[in-house]
Image: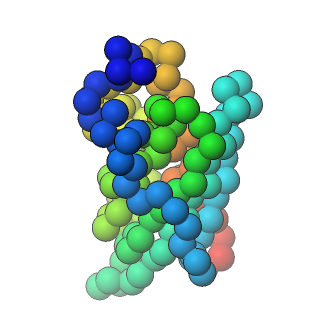
Amino acid sequence: MNEFYNKKVMDHFRNPKNMGVIKKADAVSTVGNPVCGDVMRMFLKIEKKKGKEVIKDIKFQILGCGAALATSSVTTQLAKGKTLEEAAKIDAPEIIKELGGLPAAKRHCSLLAHEALKKAIANYRKKV
């Protein structure tokens, strides 16, 4: 695996950040990629600060490859502490850039993390 992934990707794979479940989450999303079989669930805890909705906590569960795990981990780091508007702008190229790149065959993994975040935000907005 090391020959394909850089050190930052390997660090997120070996030491994923924000992995787990948020009990009583304000929003949850589940997305999957039928081509590779990866499935991700994302949990958001939202708080209001100065009239804005901010991601106080974010966690994920993943059934997938090392790249899916790394992109999920880095996406949660990018989103945590941001307003919903800021977090909704996080996209796949930003996720890949934050990881220092991904092999072409694994770039689709960043789309899964991006979709999970956007869907969780949309699910939250439907509830409020």
Residue 18 horizontal/vertical position (percent) = 41, 60
User: Relative to 94, is 33 on the left or the right?
Assistant: right
Residue at (29% x, 25% y) in the render? 6
Q: In terms of image quadrants, where is residue 50? A: bottom left
How many marks can you see?
Answer: 0
**103 or 91, which lies in front?**
103
Residue at (62% x, 65% y) in the render? 28
Instruction: Examine the rendering and report whether any part of residue 17 can be seen.
Output: yes
Instruction: Examine the rendering and report whether any part of residue 111 can be seen.
Output: no
User: Relative to 40, is 90 on the left or the right?
Assistant: left
Is residue 120 depicted above or below 74 in this figure?
Answer: below
Q: In terms of image quadrants, where is residue 82? A: bottom left
User: Relative to 18, is 109 on the left or the right?
Assistant: right
Residue 2 horizontal/vertical position (percent) = 35, 21
Is residue 105 depicted above or below 116 in this figure?
Answer: above
Quadrant location, the C terminus: bottom right
Residue at (47% x, 32% y) in the render? 67
